[in-house]
Amino acid sequence: MTTTSTAAPAATRRPGPAPVVSFRGVTKRYGTVRAVDGIDLELHPGETVALLGPNGAGKSSTLDLLLGLRTPDTGTVGVFGTTPQRAIAQGKVGAMLQSGGLMQGVKVRELVGLARDLHPRAYPLDDILRAADLTDIADRMVDKLSGGQEQRVRFALATAGAGDLIVLDEPTTGMDVSARQAFWGTMRAQAEQGRTVLFATHYLEEADAIADRVIVLHRGRVLADGTATEIKARAGARRIAFDLDGTVDREALRALPALTALEVSGCTVRIQSHDADATVHAVYGLGLYPLNLEVAGLGLEQAFLALTAATDTTTAGEAGR
Ligand SMILES: Nc1ncnc2c1ncn2[C@@H]1O[C@H](COP(=O)(O)OP(=O)(O)OP(=O)(O)O)[C@@H](O)[C@H]1O
């Protein structure tokens, strides 16, 4: 049963191999806060899935439930057909969480070696260090690392053994652009080996570029679930941009049909519309001759903002009834 009325159900009903992760009617409250509010979802082998959502959407709570760090109030969480705790004990899950300091007073090689010793299906140490791009700093003390280097160590700890699911909570926070690119290169290699990768991120461009599936969380619910392209299409709106030769009549433009946003800068007009054909037709109807006309879909960031804003409006409307 799906309790998230706004969620696209297609991705959760797909036939195929047994799910890597399954959430069934999962809720988690903290006092009066519904951090996770009736989530149903499945992850499948080999998927790279981004968990997107504004601050407080419930991303970390969802990952905590998935890793068995918290217990749901209602519903069930399954990982490889068993409980999260059992799947983790079997070495099937590697996790890189936001919180938690790294052990100090040891070298990078020693710390990764420790994680390796604890893993039931560990990889050779040099391979782990190489995959996390730590070979050159393997003999450096953990206390002396930069934020980005620390993140790479966390990644090495998460991938020290042959886990089939990798869970990453905002893994590239603190990394510069090149470190981020290298990190995602490594992650892609992991996914190509058939591992399922689930990551929470604030970087929408990362979700767009890396994930083959994006789950948008908002107020503890699944607001959208699909490819980045599907989510952009679902937000509906399109961007229209053109230049005008002469004075720009803002009032006339503001009255255009299907318009959801208008921005005028000099002679350049930028519009968001939920029916680009009708809007452009009406521009010509005003006797205007738009130059350099461009019509494009929204970027993932704009689609994300449009989707969450639409839900906030609906929720406020419902609360006012
Ligand atoms: N231990 C807790 N006690 C009380 N409230 C909590 C606790 N953990 C989370 N919350 C609340 O639950 C909601 C969801 O929080 P969560 O950390 O899961 O969101 P998030 O999407 O990961 O946010 P962020 O992007 O800011 O990390 C928030 O309103 C948060 O304040």
Image (cartoon, grey):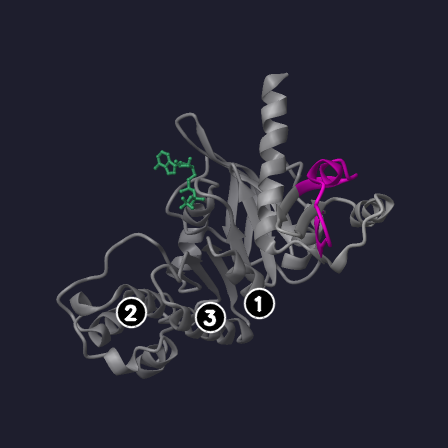
Give the Cα separation between the discs numbered 3 and 1: 15 Å
Q: Is residue 188 visible?
A: yes
The answer to if 3 sits in the magenta stretch is no
Which residue is situated farthest in the left direction here?
A: 105
Point 77% across, 55% down: residue: 290
- Residue under pointer 3: 184
- 259 drawn magenta: yes
Quadrant holding the N terminus:
top right
Q: Residues within 10 Å of mark 1 (few under 14, many from 20)?
A: some
Q: Which residues are magenta?
A: 237-261
Sequence-wise first label, 2 or 1: 1
**271 relative to 73, above or below:** below
Between 136 and 270, which is closer to the camera in this rendering? 270
Q: Are marks 2 and 3 in contact (CB under 8 Å)?
A: no
Q: Residue at x 41, y 69 (%)?
A: 177
Q: Residue at x 63, y 22 (%)?
A: 318
Q: Does label 2 point to a residue whose CB lies under 8 Å from ligand 1?
A: no
- Residue 26 located left or right of residue 108: right
- Secondary structure at badge 2 equals helix
Circle 1 residue: 46
Q: CA distance from mark 2 to mark 3?
A: 15 Å
Position in image of residue 101 (x %, y %): 23, 56
Q: Which mark sits nearer the N-terminus, 2 or 3?
A: 2
The answer to whether residue 130 is above or below residue 3 is: below
Task: Name the residue type under label 2.
Answer: Gln
Q: Is residue 177 left or right of residue 262?
A: left
Q: CA distance from mark 2 to mark 1?
A: 27 Å
Q: Earlier in the sequence, mark 3 or mark 1?
A: 1
Report x, y in % for residue 169: 41, 55
Q: Which residue matches tag 2?
A: 149
Q: Quadrant of residue 2?
A: top right
Indicate the position of residue 175 as horizontal and vertical percent values: 36, 65
